Amino acid sequence: MSVLAPENRQPENRRSAIRGGTPEPPSELSMWFSDGWTVTKRNLTKLKRSPDMLIFAVLQPIMFVLLFSQIYGGSIQVEGADYTQYLMAGIFAQTVIFGSTFSGSAMAQDLKDGIIDRFRTLPMSSSAVLIGRTNSDLVLNALSVVIMMGTGFVVGWRVNASMGSFLAGLGLLLLFSYAFSWVMALLGMSVKSPEVINNASFMILFPLTFISNAFVQSQNLPSALETFANWNPVSALVQAARELFGNTGTLPAPDAWPMQNAVLTVLIGAALMLVVFVPLCIRKFRLISSR
Amino acid sequence: MAIIEAEGLKKTYSSKSGPVHALDGMNLSVPQGTVKALLGPNGAGKTTVVKILTTLVQPTAGSAHIDGIDVLRDPKAARRIIGVSGQYAAVDEGLTGFENLEMVGRLYHLGARESKRRAQELIDQFELTEAGNRPVKGFSGGMRRRIDLAGALVIRPKILFLDEPTTGLDPRSRLSMWGIIKELVKDGTTLLLTTQYLEEADQLSDDIAVIDGGRTIAAGTADELKAQIGGHRVVVSLVDAADAPPAREILGRHGDGEPSVGGDGRTVEVAVTNGPRALQYILSDLGEAGIDLHDAGMRRPSLDDVFLKLTGHRTEDASEEATQKETAA
Ligand SMILES: Nc1ncnc2c1ncn2[C@@H]1O[C@H](COP(=O)(O)OP(=O)(O)OP(=O)(O)O)[C@@H](O)[C@H]1O
Ligand SMILES: [Mg+2]
């Protein structure tokens, strides 16, 4: 068996002798794009092959929609707005935030499988694995939100705003989730165990999504929790989406700065997460080794 | 200058029970176009050396150059000329064999068409055609290994690193892997490989470094090492343990050096120069002395023999085994 084909069997036009190393290196920028794309494509191929991740990402929110709008809905009062209209922005926020935790468990899984060691011996851009990860999870989140919007539509949720405003709301949800993916990716690389990530993120995200305005008005929470809820970044995301989708009815925004300036708060929050966690992630990735 | 040149490599890991000196002043020099085997027991530091040379781990002290590139300062340049297959297969379980190799090609920046062509070529050459279009998840250990090795060959690297390429393979797959590796180095690829088997190092390499406790304890060609430790060994297994002293005397007469008696008290062993001849003499002398045997034969020296000779102690695995046998007896 010949492992290295004799030189004369190579086609005439093959690239300048790949023997003894790669051809001239591409520029940093084109490498950044092409490597990021290669890894994104790899993740999407895997998502397509086993779509259980997508099903898992929407199953829980679908159950929440049914539970809150169809079963508890009658007993939760929101003055000035219909509860289903009020609820859906909370569901969307919850969906994308839980979706972003996949960035953490997937990084941990890649480390466990050892494929990261392969990547780290290749002459690729050192941020490509992270870019590919967060990109493909953005796609996962976009698909999940679209599915959840369809679910909302079925139970009577409607957008009461212009197309532009609707798209801005969608964009804001995805921007926040994208930035949060980087936070989770760092956690995944630090913990190195997909199971631990799943459990830990559950324990952090449950209070963040439940002690918020996602399912009930913050003013109905006990007063200490009300303050927490008003300053909780998840609440700002929910409030912003609610406003941009025109689902607030005649309900005024709670009297706290982040609630009064929800869109701005989300933009600042997302920018902060990116500025802090992108460099931390890249640095961590350079130093990490799985075994 | 040799194509792989490492000096004074130290690597200290911190663990709960204090610092672990994985490497303790390791030197390594591999001339271009040759095959070097690092031979050592579990925990000797083989993987740590490979990880440092392949840019995965930074040493605590020391320097490492490959093809004139400072691996520690310019890992990216180093990565452009190496191919690596680590101790544990680094393949993506969710992708097919073909997709794995194609992705590696893309990340070496071979371009879309060339990456596909090369991936297919490797799939054909490694006889993975059937498995090439199934996710790696369903592959056997041997197939996974081959995909991983193929991943190391996507660019036809100038320097190839293989960390225990046959550990965990059945004898047939091991032979086929040896065939592949021999074929690979025919055209002058420099190879650094690690192994726990003297026979494997002998089969595949030009030059062996025996390592233990993070440093080189002996180096040379397989023949030179064998000359140091003796060629074959004659082993006899006695029916009656009481015959051990006379048997030991007879083996000592025809062997090089002191015969050893195994933990069970019935196995006597000695290093010999001419295996078959010594075995004949030993058997006939034992027969004359009326000593009954269960079994008798020759064997090649193992890593454990090398160790016993070079360090005066056994490899940890072997001494564990011996202790277990003793306590069981
Ligand atoms: N990440 C780590 N953290 C702590 N100790 C480590 C780490 N990696 C290796 N070691 C220790 O360093 C020593 C050398 O390990 P190394 O993996 O290089 O040995 P090896 O020769 O490859 O062994 P094996 O044959 O088992 O693969 C061992 O004692 C090991 O326990
Ligand atoms: Mg090892």
Image: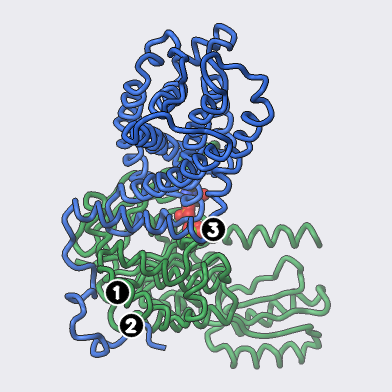
User: Residue at label 3?
Assistant: A50
Q: Residue A187, relative to residue B150: is it above or below? A: above
Which mark lies nearer to you, 1 or 3?
Answer: 3
Which element type, helix, strand or loop, lies under badge 2? Answer: loop
Q: Which chain does blue denote in the image?
A: A
Q: Residue visible at 56% across and 82% down? A: B232
Q: Is residue B268 visible?
A: yes
User: Residue at label 1?
Assistant: B156
Mark 2 Cβ inside 8 Å of ligand 2: no
Amino acid type, callout 2: Leu
> Camera-side residue: A214 or A271?
A214
Q: How many angstroms separate mark 1 from mark 2 (CA)?
A: 8 Å
Report whether B101 appears left or right of B107. Answer: right
**What crowding class fits label 1: few (fewer than 14 Cα within 10 Å), some (14-19), or many (20 or more)?**
many
Q: Residue A130, relative to residue A213: is it above or below? A: below
Q: How many angstroms separate mark 1 from mark 3 (CA)?
A: 33 Å
User: Residue at label 2?
Assistant: A4
Q: Quadrant of residue B248?
A: bottom right
Amino acid type, callout 3: Ser
Q: Residue visible at 32% across and 37% down? A: A278
